[in-house]
């Protein structure tokens, strides 16, 4: 696509873009692949940060065409090394926080504890491509999930003998998976290559990114490090404990740089609807692969820092090989509102409903939202009662690590609500998605004995429906209203903001990163496609983009990106502690057949080839026209079963097969239905 006037970016994005060197980006994009990605604005950067010690002439790219050009930026022969070395230097920049984390950093050998000193450690040299000049071994990106769907995000990056895994998410089952608790990616490839896995990097603590960690770690070496920020790992730890497991969890913070085999992974702070969300800048032999994680740009976050645009721009200036960018809200124009907006709306609702009891349903994991609710409750002298298991466990985990601060005495037990007037209480509850077992759903149905909904209740649903949940949520809202309560939900007030970037934020991200190649992730096909179009609007040529599917392997070098051989991938359906492979699952076929057509059980006893005693035929979930038809059919089926059993030579299995076929044929002939049939044969 051409940069025609109809694709003119908005005024804001142009302003931001100019600030961050969009002109250079455009120039490079127009010059084509050979010369792109070379804007390494290091001379000023490096002087500002002091001298870097660099081994000369060891970069295999130094003589390649790709390394040529842009002489005005100077010192071109060593630029690739510098680009990565400069990142190391950056990660060594001392700050108070860094000093505080010094102990851990020293242990990792990645950063000097003393403020401001920059001593490149040998292990920090740029990972270099192996295999000689002629055989350019590509870096592989393997998509296990999260593309073509929103959920079960999981990607691996492989080079030579090293693999790193990014996220291990789950997705909740759809209606065609009866009895399934959750769905996790098929990971045979990782299991087979477990000796190569140098680390699992978790971008943040949402279920679609960490929900599958126990299932992944069951199949990897127990010593495999699992990296994440404090809250992410606190939530992972809860999960592992539920599975009675432990893992090698290593807490990281933004600006940390972690060596993982031939890779080095830099942790980058981003904003999202959960605390401790990060992007990853992965140093590979061919340059940086930047994975956005889930992000939005919130310049006034409730807690923590705004997304680190400076660092992101820095990577862009040095050259990003490949950008893996999330695409959830790519269809929405403009910018996502700041989380602060929710606080403003809530404060005004508290003022307006001063004499009423307030019940707020929200996601337990959005601790910044919980923080706002608690702060506003404190201002309005209300006590806070937490309701719902996940609400309690997340708040406990977040409070333990200081991610949420709870004023002394503000929390009250939901059991003790009777001791307070309505105006003194805020109940914070799970169930913002209308989940059947959640506290709010049970309150709405009058089945939650701790809280009885009435006319003096104001219920605020501080969430938006995840697609597919609308019916359940509106049922809850209707039920609450029938009980006389007032319900405030998203279409009425600004009581929820998304955690994902909208179009203008994506434009900014692309503009800052100026990637050579781009692959959209975290979205259904329509989102991924839309994201590619957005990249093209910004000047990226279509051949530098790729839309992956689950099971796709993309191979990338500094010269090209292409689709590699696919690998076994798909979905595992987790039911209790066992799992089934979607597609080949007999269990699932059985359950679907039982749920749509019912089940027949025929039990009989054989002695010397003859049926003895009573024959039992029972059916469940099978619809007959009336009772008479049913009793006639069952009588007939007993005859059919006996005939089939007595006329079949062979073992138990053959006889079972014959009985099954006979019943099936009879039912199909008489009713045109094909239920599941279970023959039970006893031999005396
Ligand atoms: Zn998320
Ligand atoms: Zn996500």
Image: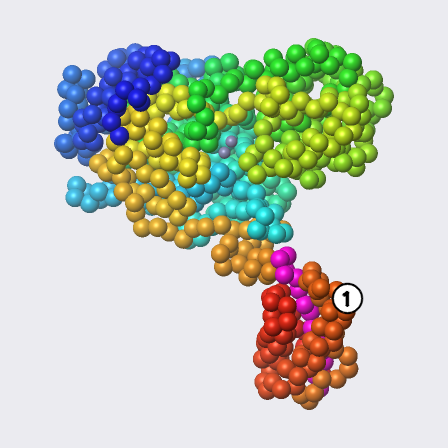
Q: Residue 346 at what x, y percent from top left?
A: 64, 16
Displayed quadrant of residue 547: top left
- Point 35% across, 13% down: residue: 11
For the rendered model, the colour scheme is rainbow
User: Along the horizontal axis of the image, is 17 left or right of 584?
Assistant: left
- Is residue 318 toward the left or the right of residue 148 in the image? left
Residue extending farthest to the right is 419
What kind of secondary structure does the magenta stretch mostly adopt? strand
Mark 1 — residue?
627
Quadrant hosting residue 106: top left
Residue 599 located within the stretch drawn in magenta: yes
Q: Under tag 1, what secondary structure? A: helix
Tell me residue 664's x, y (percent): 61, 72
Residue at the image point whose x is 31% and y is 26% from the top: 537
Asked if disc 1 is less than 8 Å from ligand 2, the answer is: no
Q: Quadrant of residue 492?
A: top right
Rendered location of residue 76, percent (x, y): 17, 23
Residue at the bottom extreme, as displayed? 608
- Label 1: few (<14), some or many (≥20) within 10 Å? few
Please tell me whether residue 206 belongs to the stretch shown in magenta: no
Residue in the picture at 80% in, 18% down: 422
Where residue 276 sits: x, y (%)?
A: 52, 26
User: Magenta part of the protein: which range?
Assistant: 594-607
Q: Nearer the viewer, residue 59 or 625?
A: 625
Q: Is residue 416 above or below residue 579?
A: above
Q: Vertical placement of 519 versus 311: above or below?
A: below
């Amino acid at each position: 696509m051409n940069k025609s006037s109809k694709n003119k970016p908005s005024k804001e994005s142009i302003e931001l873009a100019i600030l961050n060197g969009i002109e250079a980006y455009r120039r490079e994009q127009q010059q084509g692949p050979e010369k792109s990605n070379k804007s390494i604005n290091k001379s000023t950067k490096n002087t500002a940060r002091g001298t870097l010690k660099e081994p000369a002439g060891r970069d295999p790219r130094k003589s390649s065409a790709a390394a040529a050009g842009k002489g005005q930026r100077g010192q071109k022969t060593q630029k690739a090394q510098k680009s990565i070395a400069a990142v190391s230097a950056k990660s060594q920049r001392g700050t108070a926080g860094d000093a505080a984390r010094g102990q851990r950093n020293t242990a990792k050998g990645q950063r000097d504890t003393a403020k401001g000193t920059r001593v490149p450690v040998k292990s920090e040299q740029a990972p270099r491509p192996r295999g000689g000049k002629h055989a350019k071994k590509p870096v592989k990106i393997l998509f296990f999930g999260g593309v073509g769907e929103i959920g079960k995000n999981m990607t691996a990056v492989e080079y030579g003998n090293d693999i790193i895994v990014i996220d291990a998410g789950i997705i909740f089952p759809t209606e065609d998976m009866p009895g399934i608790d959750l769905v996790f990616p098929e990971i045979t490839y990782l299991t087979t290559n477990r000796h190569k896995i140098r680390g699992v990097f978790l971008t943040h603590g949402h279920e679609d990114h960490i929900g599958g960690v126990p299932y992944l770690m069951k199949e990897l070496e127990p010593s495999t490090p699992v990296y994440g920020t404090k809250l992410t790992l606190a939530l992972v730890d809860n999960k592992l404990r539920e599975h009675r497991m432990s893992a090698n969890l290593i807490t990281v913070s933004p600006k940390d740089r972690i060596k993982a085999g031939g890779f080095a992974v830099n942790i980058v702070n981003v904003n999202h609807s959960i605390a401790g969300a990060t992007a990853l800048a992965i140093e590979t032999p061919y340059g940086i692969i930047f994975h956005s994680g889930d992000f939005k740009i919130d310049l006034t976050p409730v807690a923590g820092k705004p997304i680190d645009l400076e660092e992101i721009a820095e990577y862009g200036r040095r050259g990003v090989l490949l950008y893996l960018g999330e695409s959830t809200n790519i269809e929405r124009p403009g910018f996502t509102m700041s989380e602060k907006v929710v606080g403003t709306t809530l404060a005004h609702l508290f003022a307006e409903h001063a004499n009423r009891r307030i019940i707020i349903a929200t996601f337990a994991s959005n601790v910044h939202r919980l923080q706002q609710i608690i702060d506003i409750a404190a201002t309005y002298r209300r006590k806070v009662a937490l309701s719902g298991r996940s609400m309690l466990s997340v708040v406990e985990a977040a409070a333990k690590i200081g991610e949420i601060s709870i004023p002394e005495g503000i929390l009250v037990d939901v059991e003790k609500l009777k001791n307070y007037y309505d105006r003194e209480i805020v109940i914070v509850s799970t169930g913002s998605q209308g989940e059947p077992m959640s506290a709010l759903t049970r309150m709405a149905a009058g089945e939650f004995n701790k809280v009885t909904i009435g006319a003096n209740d104001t219920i605020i649903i501080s969430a938006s429906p995840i697609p597919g949940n609308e019916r359940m949520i509106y049922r809850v809202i209707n039920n609450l209203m029938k009980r006389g309560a007032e319900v405030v939900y998203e279409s009425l007030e600004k009581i929820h903001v998304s955690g994902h970037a909208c179009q203008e934020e994506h434009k900014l991200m692309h503009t800052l990163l100026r990637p050579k190649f781009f692959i959209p992730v975290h979205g259904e096909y329509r989102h991924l496609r839309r994201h590619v179009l957005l990249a093209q609007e910004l000047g990226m040529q279509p051949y530098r983009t790729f839309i992956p599917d689950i099971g796709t392997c993309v191979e990338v070098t500094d010269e090209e990106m292409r689709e590699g051989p696919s690998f076994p991938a798909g979905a595992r359906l987790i039911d209790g502690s066992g799992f089934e492979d979607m597609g080949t699952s007999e269990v699932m076929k059985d359950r679907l057949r039982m749920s749509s057509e019912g089940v027949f059980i025929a039990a009989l006893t054989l002695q010397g080839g003859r049926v003895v005693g009573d024959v039992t035929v029972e059916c469940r979930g099978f619809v007959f026209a009336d009772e008479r038809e049913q009793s006639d059919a069952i009588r007939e089926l007993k005859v059919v079963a006996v005939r089939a059993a007595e006329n079949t030579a062979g073992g138990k299995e053959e006889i079972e097969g014959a009985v099954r076929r006979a019943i099936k044929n009879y039912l199909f002939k008489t009713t045109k239905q094909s239920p599941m049939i279970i023959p039970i044969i006893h031999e005396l």
